[in-house]
Image (tube, rainbow, N blue to C red):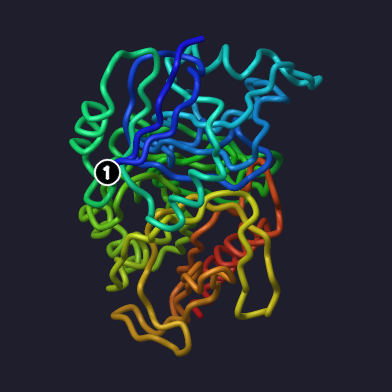
Amino acid sequence: MSKAFFVLDDGRIFEGRSLAATGKTFGEAVFQTGMTGYQETLTDPSYHKQVVVMTAPHIGNTGINKDDNESTKIWVAGFVVRNPASLTSNWRSEKDLESELIEQGIIGIAGVDTRAITRHLRDRGAMRVGIFSGLELSREEMVVEVRKVQPMSGSYLSKDVSTPKPYVVPAIGEKRFTVAAIDLGIKAATPRALSQRGVEVHVLPFDSTMDQINAVNPDGVFLSNGPGDPATMVDVIETVREILNAEIPIFGICFGHQILGRALGFETYKLQFGHRGINQPVMDKLSQRVEITAHNHGFALKAPTDSIFSTVYGPGEVTHVSLNDGVIEGLQLLERGAFSVQYHPEAAAGPHDAAYLFDRFIDLMIKYRQGVRA
């Protein structure tokens, strides 16, 4: 087994051994704090252009199966684990993790101290990184290559991960509503969660126009998760403003939450190391209930958290905040049907504390159908 190196743009290097494909790969170094759900992480389009460090030390023990994929491929730029499982043991497993990584050409590294990497990123912040596996390069050459990589700030990535053409996820049972889901990097679990509630979901490309959205005749619009810098999504932000003017109910999550916030006039900023994992505590300010939630975001909104704020679409308020660092995790308009959260209510592979948000979206569409606007 050949040597591999995890090389950060500040010059810090961790030596390990090759995992899966060999060669070199680059991206933003981020850590993921979940102990389960590595398959959902690998196939989540929001991780496009990111090298994911798994903080849990033992990864791969349940193997891989086709049912838990969140998209049609693995999106992570690279994968970093402490101890890859030597044995797969799960009744749903169809192949082992490394075989799947090799098949899709994913370069990884094993045998590194992922706790030390995580502490380093927490101190220094998310940064550019390269994995060099099975290559004969000097340390200086590797660092130089990493420093040529484009940072995540300013990255326009939804075009890489969005569906090229519309498709429909039918309602399960009786159809109650039609929703246009703008695919900024959507996970498969999201339209599935809506379909289970009687919603026919029309998944549309990220650059769909208002005319194309109206052609679906939607009862509501869903803004999905996705990768990249929300400040680059100028056309999508303008389309969201058109949806707000048309008074069609909106529910946004993750990247969609940031885009809705920018459509309301707020700025976004890059977090030091972001929130990633299935164990993030969030306070619902309206109910004072604490939810354990699934996150994957490196940007956040700037908005008043202790008072009602004003927008051209009427007053609004922050509804959810992170209990770890106070970051805004949700907002809503008070006189128009639009709300969003910075996390994943579909939460594959869990937890499901936030599943009620899909029901809140259903209730909002019911009110609009009945002519209630506040």
Which quadrant of the view contains residue 49?
top left
Question: Residue 360 placed where, x, y %?
Answer: 62, 65
Of 66 and 50, nearer the camera is 50
Q: Is residue 184 visible?
A: yes
Of 190 and 283, nearer the camera is 283
Which residue reaches farthest right? Answer: 91
Q: Residue at x 27, y 18 (%)?
A: 137
Q: Is residue 221 visible?
A: no
> Does residue 60 appear left or right of residue 100 in this picture?
right
Q: Residue at x 27, y 43 (%)?
A: 207
Q: What residue would you read off at disc 1? A: 207
> Does residue 289 appear left or right of residue 332 in this picture?
right
**In this view, 174 is above or below 1:** below
Question: Residue 1 placed where, x, y %?
Answer: 51, 9
Residue type (three-letter) at the residue carrying disc 1:
Asp
Question: Residue 249 placed where, x, y %?
Answer: 46, 64
**The residue tagged with tag 1: helix, strand or loop?**
loop
> Does residue 334 appear left or right of residue 94 in this picture?
left
**In this view, 264 is above or below 188:** below
Which residue reaches farthest bottom? Answer: 307
Of 197 and 176, nearer the camera is 197
User: How many callouts does the rendering have?
Assistant: 1
Q: Residue at x 30, y 44 (%)?
A: 212
Q: Residues within 10 Å of mark 1 (few under 14, many from 20)?
A: some
